[in-house]
Amino acid sequence: MSKERLTHTLLKTTFYLLGFQVLLTLSFSVETKRQALSERGAHCQRCGRTPGKGKLFAHHILPQSWGGADILDNLYLSCGACHVILDSQIFSEGILADGRDASNVEMHWPELIDIDKHGVYCRAIKKLTKKRLRNHA
Ligand SMILES: [Zn+2]
């Protein structure tokens, strides 16, 4: 484990222990973000645009607040405009940045869920399912 990753993990654990994890989300490590940039290039994965430096977002495919893990597979590079659209799409319809359905994550892509936040994921999906049923009624 690199020093950077270790520091990130320690900080995350500390905040979790203090009960601040929701308020002080630390997101992806610099190392993970660098890896995404070098593998995918510095452009938005949704619209393909190359925004200015510092304006490319490391979007969580499965949101952190839904138990999303801080791993490369859960990172989606997006510009500011697409970031807003992607957030709205996931929270209102449960559709992930890449078009997958959030309610299938546990079954098909369990690695996207932070193992410590499995309960958070289950509660989020329960809420989403209720919302969907209401909208179809
Ligand atoms: Zn974009």
Image (cartoon, helix red, strand yellow):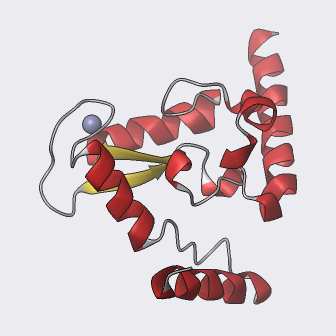
Q: Is residue 71 left or right of residue 43?
A: right
Q: Position of residue 66 (x, y in %)?
A: 70, 50
- Can you say which quadrant of the picture contains the N terminus? bottom right
Q: Is residue 30 left or right of residue 102?
A: left
Q: Quadrant of residue 120?
A: bottom right
Task: Residue at 82% x, 9% y: name it.
Answer: 137
In the displayed structure, 92 sits above or below 19; it is: above
Q: Is residue 120 left or right of residue 47?
A: right
Furthest-top residue in view?
A: 137
Q: Is residue 23 left or right of residue 41?
A: right
Task: Residue at 49% x, 33% y: name it.
Answer: 97
Q: Position of residue 5 (x, y in %)?
A: 52, 79
Question: How many numbered discs sit on the rendered protein?
Answer: 0
Q: Quadrant of residue 116?
A: bottom right
Q: Quadrant of residue 31?
A: bottom left
Task: Residue at 15% x, 43% y: name it.
Answer: 50
Q: Give whichever of 42, 120 is nearer the camera.
A: 42
Furthest-front residue in view?
A: 1
In the displayed structure, 60 sits above or below 18; it is: above
Quadrant containing ligand 1 reads top left
Q: Give whichever of 92, 78 is nearer the camera.
A: 78
Task: Residue at 78% x, 87% y: name it.
Answer: 17
In the displayed structure, 117 sits above or below 8; it is: above
Q: Position of residue 88 (x, y in %)?
A: 50, 37
Q: Position of residue 55 (x, y in %)?
A: 22, 57
